[in-house]
Image: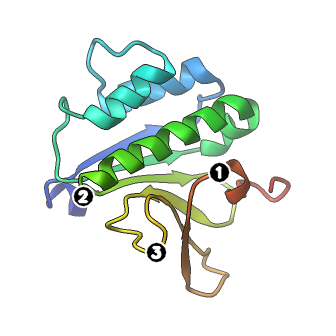
Amino acid sequence: MDEVTDQGWRAFYVDGAAVMDKASFLDAFAVALGFPSYFGQNWDALEECLTEMTWAPGTGYVILWDDVANFADAAPEQWETALAIFNQAADYWQARDVPFYLLVRARGITGAKFRICSKTLCSKTGAGICREQSDSSPRRSSCRRLTSRSINLSSNRR
């Protein structure tokens, strides 16, 4: 992540190993991103913190979230809400020409890697998800809005 921070970006790492519900999700992100003390531990507060970022100024933002499958599998409705909030944040930063990435990784599961990004980085469809094919797939990318249907986190999940 040194490459992005050298460019003035802010980079954050979220360990999702213990994220199984809304409360643990919000806790993990608050700690990893260093949310201010006024963070309200709710969805509205998450959206506010992801779009204001005055407490973490940067020329761009990248968040690496490991073990995302834990949360998606254990709390699918809360997972859907989180995805909607990340898309709102991507839209917000896109309108301001500020790069915003959410990289999600499911440890121990082979498959595609995904990131939420801003229009300046995904010019085909605007704010949304950029999918990079896994090493076993042909090298090509496609962009689309992030939904749970667009993410295959494990071999038995579509």
Q: Which residue is mark 3?
A: 124
Cβ atoms under marks 1 and 3 closer than 8 Å: no
Dot 1 or dot 2: first in sequence order is 2
Q: Secondary structure at mark 2?
A: loop
Give residue 81's position: percent from left, percent from top.
60, 33
Q: Label 1, label 2: how many angstroms apart (C-alpha)?
A: 23 Å
Dot 1 or dot 3: first in sequence order is 3
Quadrant in which the N terminus appears: bottom left
Q: Label 3, label 2: how many angstroms apart (C-alpha)?
A: 15 Å
**Vertical placement of residue 62 versus 28, above or below:** below
Quadrant in which the C terminus appears: bottom right
Q: Amino acid at mark 1?
A: Thr
In the displayed structure image, the side of residue 14 where residue 144 appears, left or right: right
Asked whether the viewer can see residue 102, the reply is yes
Q: Which mark is residue 147?
A: 1
Q: Residue at x 30, y 53 (%)?
A: 95
Asked whether the viewer can see residue 16, the reply is no
Q: Amino acid at mark 3?
A: Lys
For the residue carrying disc 1, how many other residues have a C-alpha within 10 Å: few (<14), some (14-19), or many (20+)? some
Q: Which mark is residue 97?
A: 2
**Vertical placement of residue 50 versus 137, above or below:** above
Q: Secondary structure at mark 1?
A: loop
Q: Amino acid at mark 2?
A: Asp
Give residue 18's position: percent from left, percent from top.
59, 28
Q: Residue at x 58, y 35 (%)?
A: 17
In the displayed structure image, the side of residue 58 where residue 87 appears, left or right: right
Q: Secondary structure at mark 3?
A: loop
Q: Label 1, label 3: how many angstroms apart (C-alpha)?
A: 17 Å
User: What coloring was used for the rendering?
Assistant: rainbow
Q: Residue at x 68, y 66 (%)?
A: 111
For the residue carrying disc 3, how many other residues have a C-alpha within 10 Å: few (<14), some (14-19), or many (20+)? few
Dot 3 or dot 2: first in sequence order is 2
